[in-house]
Amino acid sequence: MDQTTTSVDPAATSAGEADNKDLMKASPPPKRRIYPWVVAALAFGLLLADYMSRQVLAAVFPLLKAEWSLTDAKLASLNSIVALMVGLLTFPLSVIADRFGRVRSLVTMAVVWSLATLMCGLAANFEQMLVARFFVGVGEAAYGSVGIAVVLSVFAPRLHSSLSGAFMAGGSFGSVLGVSLGGVIAVNFGWRWSFTAMAVFGLILAALFRVVVTESRLKRHAVRDDGAVEEAAHRTKIRVPVSTLFTNPAVWCAYVGSGLQMFTAAVLLSWTPSLFNRYYGLDTAEAAGVAGLFVLLVGTGMVVSGIITDRVSRVNVSNKWLSAIAYCAISLVSLGIAFRIEPGAAQLWLLAIGAFFAGGSSGPTAAMVASLTHETVRSSALGTLTVANNVLGLALGPFVIGILADKLGLMESLALAPLFYIGAIVALFIGWRVYPRGLRKLAAQSESYAKQAAASA
């Protein structure tokens, strides 16, 4: 084979080196990977503030009942109005955030719920408190879905289950903090200061988030898949319609599976204090304290389960579906046995195991929803997931068990709650089977809208 020798002009070489130096100066500095963790920490802190503001009410129930002579129904309405607003407004507000800016939306939400919480502390009667709690729900409605969308945008997909699980677990941790700190503040300074403290905490974090997190910084640190879907989106700026969130069967499976697995988790969060009060002879304060430990187990399990899922799905992403199924199966067996045996040490151990994995599927299902939806509608997709979790789980679970408890007894009705994991397992199994088809459908949709955008440009 012939070899050709090429002479090199020293002047050209010097010019090339100069050009390279200029290019190096002009090129943007390498991304600092500490910034995404700062974003995650601030978003998680706001999520804690979200649930602290929501659940601090439970700590002052006895004081409000005594001061304003409220019935239990009125007390319950102060709590349910927030959940109602979250269920009604999560999806539309998530869509708005996708269209008009997620960072601006998050800051606005935090300011609204914090000011509304402050108004709770200033309320002079039940009617004023109800209006203030209404606006707490309005502010908190879409924070979870938009906040996790922001966090996932700056991290690689291999960490999405861990981050999603940790983020969703923030609700459990925030609930415990809101009740415990709210109770301590109320006893020492009065119930109005409990609301005030939560409001100030939220406003401080909102201001800090506004200073540190911006849309331009998020774009510089954005992490995209190496696949054709994200590459096509990167080459051509496109915006897919919201209707694509409901045309992918795999996404529907994730919605239903996540909502049904939250049914039993919500039952544990709501009814464990009554369980320990009625069957273990603990007084109200002691029962709440022990129940708080189980709430922490639920939250901790979400975090650990997400980490485990990311590790076992590094090679095969579809293993996230199988991980979610495994967590549901563990809780189904553990809790199914626990609620059918006599109170005692064995029941407590089984309850602990079941509680740890009760919400373990939350991280994997959120990661699956994120991977099956286009980035321009991801907040809307996670908002839809939040609606499913609230409608099928957080709202439905405690209500159904409460009705059954009046007829069957609390322990007997609790024994039926784990059966909802069967529905979750079926939905997740179907999702695992159709997942490859769902990815192909997403790729085809994205490519189609990219071509339309390029043709109209």
Image (spheres, rainbow, N blue to C red):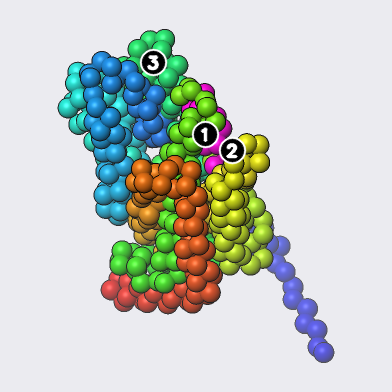
Above or below 197: residue 30? below
Left or right: 94, with 262 as reference point: left
Q: Assess disc 1: are there few (<14), some (14-19) or many (≥20) residues with their C-alpha within 10 Å of its C-alpha.
A: few
Identify the magenta region.
286-298
Left or right: 382, with 95 as reference point: right
Tell me whether the residue at label 3 lies in contact with that at label 2, contact meaning CB atoms closer than 8 angstroms: no
Q: Which residue is mark 3?
A: 186
Q: 21 or 118: which is nearer to us?
A: 118
Above or below 414: residue 377? below
Left or right: 28, with 135 as reference point: right
Tell me whether the residue at label 3 lies in contact with that at label 1, contact meaning CB atoms closer than 8 angstroms: no
Q: Which mark is residue 343?
A: 2
Left or right: 41, with 252 as reference point: right
User: In x, y percent, where is residue 97?
Assistant: 31, 50
Separation (CA) of disc 2 from disc 1: 7 Å
Q: Which residue is mark 1?
A: 279
Q: 66 or 314: which is nearer to us?
A: 66
Q: Assess disc 2: are there few (<14), some (14-19) or many (≥20) residues with their C-alpha within 10 Å of its C-alpha.
A: some
Which image quadrant is residue 124 in? top left
Of pointers 2 and 1, the one earlier in the residue sequence: 1
Residue 163 visible within the image: no
Please say whether residue 210 is one of the residues in the magenta stretch.
no
What's the residue type where badge 1 is placed? Tyr
Q: 415 or 315: which is nearer to us?
A: 415
Residue at x-position 59% and y-position 64%: 322
Which image quadrant is residue 51 in? top left
Question: What SS does tag 1 mark?
Answer: helix
**Magenta span: chief secondary structure:** helix
Of pointers 3 and 2, the one earlier in the residue sequence: 3
Above or below 452: residue 31? above
User: In x, y percent, where is residue 13?
Assistant: 68, 62
